[in-house]
Amino acid sequence: MGHPDPLVIDPTGRDIHGEATRIREHGPVTLVELPDGVAAWAVSSPDLLKRLLTDPRVSKDPRRHWTRWINGEIAPEWPLFTWVAVQNMFTAYGGEHKRLRALVSKAFTARRTAALQPRVEEITKNLLDRVEQAGKDGQVVDLREGFCYPLPIQVISELFGLPEDQGAELRAVVDGIFHTSATPEEVTDIYTRFYAALAKLVAFKRESPGDDLTSALIASRNDEGGTGLSEQELLDTLVLMVSAGHETTVNLIDNAIHALLTHPDQLALVRSGHASWDDVVEETLRVEAPVASLPLRYAVEDLAMGEFGGPEGVVIGKGEAILAAYAAAGRHPGKYGDDADRFDVTRVDKEHLAFGYGVHFCLGAPLGRLEARIALPALFERFPDLQLAVSQDELEPVDSFISNGHRSLPVRLR
């Protein structure tokens, strides 16, 4: 690519924000090295990123626009393979993206999301009952495992009409998709199991359709006009909605709880009515983007960054890959000031790119926000004396440079 010193991304994600700072220090758009030596241009400037995300000369389709994919250089064992190999609206471009998004939008309606609110409230209450039982007599409770994780996975499972006996396998394979330091053998195993689990779900729903998202997508698959989902598109759409719709919400709730417990002054502002739970959710999405860096996009033609308001002389070449550096963008001092890395629920400008931007803006954003807006006040009202059970430097991140959350969140209820 003609750049002498790419920044090597740590695939384990052990220092998401330290790495985000290094990306910004290299410039608003800089060459980075992903696992297995795959190069991409990381874009950390919010304004530049927004311009690129809305420009038709930037694609998400590797089959048409990524030179390394076209040349057969990306193996199925690559840790990020599933992120780029799927055939759904996440990796579609132009007219194909419009077709796929329209079909999914018909199934994943605002009505279907709104109708979930009572059920989200019920699941939240039941999980908090279990948390209370587990935390009796000062016992340490892992809130990520006991609350942040099971709430979104149960919601998404019910949204998809997943039979209860298939839940454990789905959870295991979803976790594997975000394991960006996985071995080739692990990648192959997860990929195979994920598709087997979803094929089993589709087969069940063909036999026993219901008022659920899987049945609605199957109906799109059976569209007689010839514009419906192909079988591969159907499975890959389920891959997208299960993985993206779950992990982002887990991290959002996890990071919000952690931020409030480590910033008691901010929690006090919420409790006193000087800030809202909406403020908590949006500031968490800004300062702790649940997806730190999202792979991948591709230049349809040579893109001179100066034309986008970026650095003069930097060109993303035709067929080269682009990494949306959301964690770096969310703490950009040029937009948010010198205190950009501070969690501040009263911050006026909480605009963020955590759910993407432009035509690929996340369809599941309303559901993720709904779950967080229900879960957070319920948790802190139920356990007003909640506190971390370990020091902050003892918390470990999840094993991923994509997913930004904690491996566990140990707390005491009082």
Image (cartoon, rainbow, N blue to C red):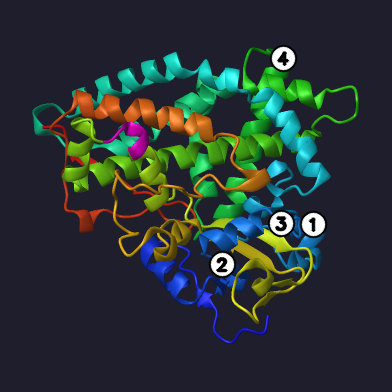
Q: Amino acid at mark 3?
A: Asp
Q: Is residue 168 above or below residue 240?
A: above
Q: Kindly identify the residue that appears in the image at 27 percent across and 45 percent down.
A: 258
Quarter of the figure that contains the N terminus: bottom right
Q: CA distance from mark 1 to mark 4?
A: 34 Å
Q: Are marks 3 and 2 in contact (CB under 8 Å)?
A: no
Q: Secondary structure at mark 2?
A: strand
The residue mark sitting in front, 1 or 4, is 1
Q: Are marks 1 and 3 in contact (CB under 8 Å)?
A: no
Q: Secondary structure at mark 3?
A: loop
**Dot 2 corresponds to which residue?**
42
x and y percentages locating residue 102 in the rendered image: 74, 32
Q: Quadrant of residue 232?
A: top right
- Numbered badge on residue 55: 3
Q: CA distance from mark 4 to mark 3?
A: 43 Å
**Dot 1 corresponds to which residue?**
63
Quarter of the figure that contains the C terminus: top left
Q: Is residue 271 above or below residue 92?
A: above
Q: Amino acid at mark 1?
A: Arg
Q: Earlier in the sequence, mark 2 or mark 1?
A: 2
Q: Are marks 4 and 3 in contact (CB under 8 Å)?
A: no
Q: Is residue 133 above or below residue 211?
A: below
**Dot 4 corresponds to which residue?**
207
The residue mark sitting in front, 4 or 2, is 2
Residue stretch in magenta: 275-279
